[in-house]
Amino acid sequence: MDKFLIQGPVQLKGEVNISGSKNSALPILFASLLTNELIEIKNIPKLKDIDVTIKLLLTLGVKIKKGKSLIINANNLYKNYILPKKLIQSIRASIWLISPLLIRFKKIKIYLPGGCSIGRRPIDLHIKNLKKLGANIYIKNEFIIASINNRFQGAYIFMKKSSVGATINSILAAIYANNITIIENAAREPEIEDLINFLNMIGANIRGGGTKKIIIKGVKKLTGGIYTIMPDRIETGTFLIAAALSRGKVLCKNTNPKNLDILFKKLKHVGAKIKIGKDWCSLNMNNKRPKAIDIITGPYPKFPTDIQPQFTLLNCIALGKSIITETVFENRFLYIYELIKMGAKIFIKNNKVFCQGVNLLYGSEIEATDLRAAISLVLAGCIATGITIINNINYIDRGYENIENKLINLGARIIRLKN
Ligand code: UD1
C-alpha cells in the first residue's frame, strides 16, 4: 500500500470542487442492470470503489463507454456464473448485485460482500427483506445462494433497524414485483433519494424517498435516460471540518448544502462562520481555535457516522472537553490509537470517546485502518507539528477523488510514496 508523507502545520484555505457522491453512484451503477436500454450517468467520481463496480459490471457482460460520463448498456449479460471473489469482497456495495441479478437470472450464487472493517456489518436485514419479497435465500459457507419464481412479490416490510444497504436492496427487488411494496422505517439518507430519482427517471414507480415510508408499485418495463449523480455530502463535510480544525477558510463548490443541516449546526457551535448558497457553502474560522462540541452519530438526518472520525479530530484540538458517541457501527474508533500517538488526549469506553482538547498534535508514523479513519489522519497530519507518515493510505482512494491534489490546492504539503 502507498504512504502519505505530510509536513505540518498548515492552515487550509481556498476553494474546492466537490465530486459526485460515492454512496449514490454505487447503487445507481448496480441498478443499471435493471434496464435493457442505454443509460448515461454523469458526475461519477473517480474512485477505487467505482473502478471495482465497473469491473464487476464488465465481468457480467455490461458494455460501458467511459468518457466524461459513463454510457451503460446492460442489454446482453453473460450467462450466470460466479463473480470473482476478489472483486466482490473488496467493496460493501457488491451486496446490491443480489436483487438486480435475481431479476435477470432468477437464480444466483454470489460471494458475501466485503468493505471497510468498521464493525460486524451483518446482512440479516437484506436477507429477511428479500425473503419477504418472495426470494428463497440463504448463506452457505462464503456464498449467498438465492432464487425467485419468475419475479419478486410485492410485500409489506417493517425494518427493525434503519439500514441504508437493506433499504436499497429492497427497493431494487420491488421495482418489477407484482403488487405494491411498502417499506416502513426505511433509511432516509439523501443517497437513497438520489437512487429513487434515477429509478423514477427510467420508469419506476416509487414514492416516499427521503421519508420513513417508501411505496413501490411494480412496473413492467424500465427505459433509458441521462442522470447526474448528486454531490458528495460526506466529502463536503470533510472539507468544511478541514477548514475548521486548521483555523482556515474553505469554499466548497458544486455541492448541495441542503443535506448537511446537522453538521452546519455543530460547526456553528464550534465557532465557525458558515455561508450557504444554492450549490456552494463556505466555512471561515477566522484564525480562532474551535470549541469542543459533543456529537452522537445516527441514521440521517442525525449526525453522519461517515463524518465522525473527522469531527473527533476537530474535538481533539478544540478548546474544552467533549464526548463522541457512535451508535451506527460498533468498531469505528480504531484510528483513535493513532491520534493518541500524535498527542491527542482521548480514551474510548464502549461506544463513546472522551476527549480533552490539546493545543498541538505532533507528527508521527501512523496507520490508516479504513476510509474515513484515513482522511481523519491525513487532516491530523496537516495540522500537526513536524512530519507525519501515514501507512496503508490506499483506503483513502476508495472514497476521496484526487484527495492529495485537492488538499495541496488548499495549502497542504503532502507527498504520496508509491509502494
Ligand atoms: C452505508 C454506507 C456507509 C455508511 C452507512 C451508514 C455505502 C456503500 N455505505 O453502509 O458509508 O456509513 O450506510 O450511513 O453506501 N445492519 C444490520 N443488518 C443488516 C444491515 C445493516 O444489523 O442487514 C446494521 C449495521 O451493522 C449498522 C447499521 O445497521 O450497525 C447501519 O448499517 P447500514 O445503514 O446498512 O450501512 P451500509 O449500507 O453497510
Image: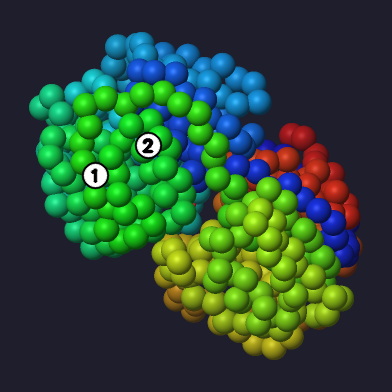
Residue 313's x, y, as percent? 68, 69
Provide the secondary structure element on which disc 2 rests.
helix
The amino acid type found where label 1 is placed reads Ile
Q: Is residue 378 visible?
A: yes
Choose top left, top right, bottom left or bottom right for residue 376.
bottom right
Image point (23%, 53%), residue name: 183
Instruction: Check the image and tell me how it is coloured.
Output: rainbow
The amino acid type found where label 2 is placed reads Leu
Residue 24's x, y, as percent? 49, 43
Image point (30%, 57%), residue name: 186
Q: Say whether residue 38 is left or right of residue 419.
A: left
Mark 1, residue position = 216
Q: Between residue 264 and residue 8, name the one nearer to us.
A: 264
Image point (84%, 61%), residue name: 12
Provide the secondary structure element on which disc 1 rests.
strand
Q: Is residue 138 visible?
A: no
The answer to whether the residue labelled 1 contacts the one labelled 2, judged by CB atoms less than 8 Å apart, is: no
Please determine whether, in this image, residue 70 is positioned above or below residue 212.
above
Q: Between residue 357 and residue 401, name the one nearer to us.
A: 401
Residue 127's x, y, as percent? 22, 45
Please determine whether, in this image, residue 395 is positioned above or below residue 235.
above
How far apart, in angstroms, are the residues tagged by discs 1 and 2?
Answer: 11 Å
Mark 2, residue position = 199
Q: Say whether residue 387 is left or right of residue 210.
A: right
Choose top left, top right, bottom left or bottom right for residue 153.
top left
Classify mark 1: residues with Cα within 10 Å, few (<14), some (14-19) or many (20+). many
Classify mark 2: residues with Cα within 10 Å, few (<14), some (14-19) or many (20+). many
